[in-house]
């Protein structure tokens, strides 16, 4: 039978390794706890580092798919260095490989366009923050919605709600089938996406309208252009 006290120490070590992996002071104090410190400082930290190493390889592998040249002068620019280190920080804390690849696409586009001045670097950081704030599944929901909006181009004689009504049930069905999000949860997922500025809930006093439909904003297309998912 497995020793329960060892299990307890192992669980504590797991938690402390993740919580204080970048804090040498706390790790030093943890080492003073008998039976706990060695686990925190060696095997588990090594495991976390291995996990982060895998993430950075995914990032670099995706970057390498596009042959981008960078001058020595560009490498020294504050905008480039700041944007690079911000991106790597997010990559190291991202679990889904698909999302890590999106970070790589976003960075590649930024470098390829050489947008290293202050204003463009600030804009890049905004796009970076939006991507970090979204789960990959939320991103997929927006992509599915964009497909339906492309198939149903804006008609200026109709309201946003009338346009959404044309495909909304099919949109919900596709999100349910492809992303396995229960239909009763999809309205909540969409409501939360308002925070990104890429999606907005349609508002207004429409007859029998429950307020659960929406559309993509111009910022969504700016965001997609920044990622360059078609490349």
Image: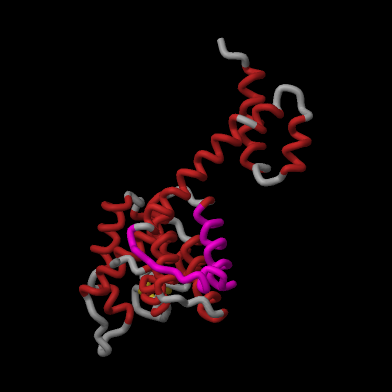
Observer-nearest residue: 31 or 129?
31
Name the image quarter holding residue 141.
bottom left
Observer-nearest residue: 178 or 169?
178
Main secondary structure of the magenta stretch:
helix
Left or right, 55 with respect to 77, comes to: left
Left or right, 30 with respect to 169, comes to: right
Observer-nearest residue: 18 or 157?
18
- Where 76 falls versus 28 (above or below)? below
- x 27%, y 73%: residue: 149
Q: Quadrant of the C terminus?
A: bottom left
Q: Is residue 140 visible?
A: yes
Q: Quadrant of the N terminus?
A: top right
Name the image quarter holding residue 82.
bottom right
Percent of width and height locating residue 69: 40, 68
Percent of width and height locating residue 140: 35, 59
Name the image quarter holding residue 114.
bottom left
- x 71%, y 22%: residue: 35
- x 32%, y 78%: residue: 161
Residue 49 lies within the magenta run: no
- x 35%, y 51%: residue: 182
Percent of width and height locating residue 199: 41, 71
Magenta highlight range = 65-91
Q: Is residue 201 visible?
A: no
């Amino acid at each position: 039978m497995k020793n329960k006290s060892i299990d307890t120490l192992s669980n504590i070590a797991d938690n402390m390794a993740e919580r204080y992996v970048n804090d040498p002071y706390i790790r030093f104090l943890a080492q003073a706890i008998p039976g706990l410190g060695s686990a925190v400082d060696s095997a588990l930290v090594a495991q976390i580092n291995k996990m982060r190493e895998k993430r950075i390889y995914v990032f670099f592998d995706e970057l390498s798919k596009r042959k981008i040249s960078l001058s020595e002068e560009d490498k020294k620019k504050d905008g480039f260095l700041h944007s690079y280190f911000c991106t790597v920080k997010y990559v190291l804390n991202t679990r889904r490989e698909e999302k890590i690849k999106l970070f790589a696409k976003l960075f590649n586009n930024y470098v390829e366009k050489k947008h290293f001045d202050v204003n463009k670097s600030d804009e890049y950081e905004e796009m970076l923050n939006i991507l970090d704030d979204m789960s990959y599944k939320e991103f997929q929901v927006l992509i599915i919605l964009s497909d339906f909006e492309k198939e149903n181009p804006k008609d200026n004689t109709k309201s946003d709600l009338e346009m959404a009504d044309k495909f909304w049930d099919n949109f919900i069905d596709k999100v349910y089938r492809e992303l396995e999000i229960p239909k009763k949860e999809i309205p909540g997922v969409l409501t939360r996406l308002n925070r990104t500025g890429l999606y907005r809930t349609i508002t207004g006093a429409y007859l029998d309208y429950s307020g659960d439909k929406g559309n993509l904003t111009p910022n969504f297309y700016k965001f997609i252009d920044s990622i360059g998912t078609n490349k």
